[in-house]
Amino acid sequence: MATDYDAPRRNESEDLPEDSLEELKAKRNDAQSGSVDTDEGEMADNFELPGADLSGEEMTVKVLPKQADEFTCSSCFLVHHRNRLAGERNGKYVCRDCAA
């Protein structure tokens, strides 16, 4: 299909059919009606509050002991790989994040 580049350009708004004000209001009301029906109680059940009793819950994460190529930072107490070692302070290992 050939395109006439000399022809005047049309805006996208010219291509759309014009709706009456009443039709636009009705469409807006229809789109908003679904959001009102959600139950706030159901949404609140999915959140866990701080300090909630979780004594009956079991951990599903497998915890591994510190590996030979890892160290514990003496500042943040996180276990890092040896490539994160920045140096030693007073004979204790420090990670790059804490050394910065």
Image (cartoon, helix red, strand yellow):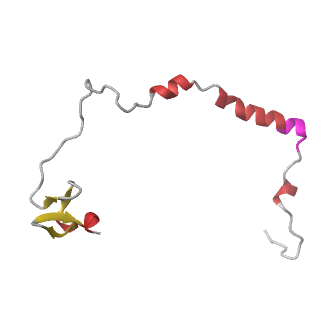
The image shows residue 86, relative to residue 67, as above or below, that is below
Look at 17% across and 43% down and name the residue there: 63
Look at 86% across and 36% down and name the residue there: 23
The image shows residue 8, relative to residue 34, as above or below, that is below
Determine the image quadrant of residue 73.
bottom left
Q: Is residue 94 magenta?
A: no
Q: Is residue 16 left or right of residue 48?
A: right
The image shows residue 43, relative to residue 65, as above or below, that is above
Q: Please state the horizontal and vertical placement of residue 100, each as a whole percent of the image.
A: 29, 69
| Magenta residues, start to end | 19-24
Q: Please state the horizontal and vertical placement of residue 53, each as a whole percent of the image.
A: 31, 25
Q: Please state the horizontal and vertical placement of residue 74, each as a whole percent of the image.
A: 17, 58
Q: Is residue 44 left or right of residue 58?
A: right
Q: Nearer the viewer, residue 37 or 20?
A: 37
Determine the image quadrant of residue 84.
bottom left
Q: Main secondary structure of the magenta part?
A: helix
Q: Nearer the viewer, residue 21 or 93?
A: 93
Q: Please state the horizontal and vertical placement of residue 70, each as a whole percent of the image.
A: 14, 59
